Amino acid sequence: MASLFQRISTDASVGTTIGTFDAINTRNADNRLDENAKVIVGLSFAGAPADQTTATATAGRLRYENAGAGIAAGEADFMVGSSHGAGIATQSMGWWLPAEFIPYEPVVSGSLGNTVGNLSFSQVGIEPADNWSVVAGVLHGASVPPAWDWNVAGALRPNGSASSNGAGVSATTATSLTSTTILSKYRKLISWRPSTVADPLQTTTEECVGFSALDTATTTFAMAPNEHVMPALGAALLGTLVGAGIDGYQPALPMYVEVPGNSNQTLDVVLNLTTAVTAAMAFGYSIGVRR
């Protein structure tokens, strides 16, 4: 199969100091690639500050290195799109921050199979502030899928889409977002569109960051490892809250999994939060499919 794989690394406290890359190492400190890996096609990221400081700009960058593949520190440092700033005293709502895919095809010197890569995070800007909670992964496989560049550009149209009811989640315990059926006429999963929506008012110093595993025990076809990032919610500065709620728009992110057989298959998506939240937020997803 030509499926792409991804294993997520997580950390709930990185990036305080500008210029210092902190290892993302609470989960999968050593992010090992599949034994048949020959290509890396990109990185996935989502994150949010774990606190919110008044009138402070926060933004970050993601680093990938892999000594076995000849990818040195400083060779793959990417700005990430997640940022926020100008918190207003004690009455600032949190921010909604997108899950993102960073297209990336390194020129490697050596084999990729079973090599260990490491991900790290640093802030960038004018002043250090607020630890970040982050999730990040490396999308890789045995080959670049057909029409992959079209898929990254959003020009590869799905023939359909599968989705589920989603779920409200507050705990770090792995929680199903309910399963969906992949009809037998669809043999490829090509896009991942996750949803994180704030429900109750947020709590001070309480971010909402996580990832979803598609390669669960109740998914009826092999695709491991296949984990993907969710949009994030930043912490709030509470007081007498004013203004609107927390809004966001999440585009579909590229992925590629070949579905075996000629019968309907079940896909069960399970959410994992890096830290618990006081009250459940709403989560969901849809998967773009092709014949």
Image (spheres, grey):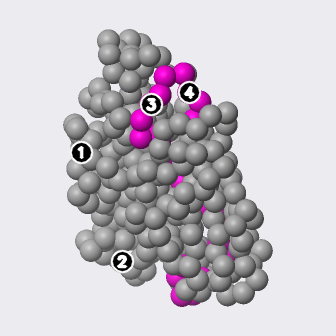
Which stretch did the figure color magenta? 33-58
Identify the secondary structure beneath mark 4. Answer: loop
Residue at mark 1: 170
Question: What amino acid is labelled 1 in the image?
Answer: Ser
Q: Which mark is residue 52?
A: 3
Please report whichever mark, 1 or 3, sits nearer to the chain's N-terminal start: 3
Residue drawn at x 34%, y 47% as measured from the top left: 284
Foreground residue among 18 and 217: 18
Foreground residue among 101 and 9: 9
Cα–Cα gap, marks 2 and 1: 28 Å
Please report whichever mark, 2 or 4, sits nearer to the chain's N-terminal start: 4
Q: Are marks 2 and 3 in contact (CB under 8 Å)?
A: no
Question: What amino acid is labelled 4 in the image?
Answer: Thr
Q: Is residue 111 magenta?
A: no
Q: Are marks 2 and 1 in contact (CB under 8 Å)?
A: no
Looking at the rendered image, the disc whose residue lies closer to the viewer, 2 or 3, is: 3
Q: Is residue 51 magenta?
A: yes
Question: What amino acid is labelled 2 in the image?
Answer: Phe
Cα–Cα gap, marks 3 and 4: 8 Å
Cα–Cα gap, marks 2 and 3: 42 Å
Residue at mark 4: 56
Does residue 170 lie above or below 45 as drawn? above
Residue drawn at x 60%, y 50% as measured from the top left: 122
- Left or right of residue 235, residue 127 in this image: right
Residue at mark 2: 221
Cα–Cα gap, marks 1 and 3: 20 Å
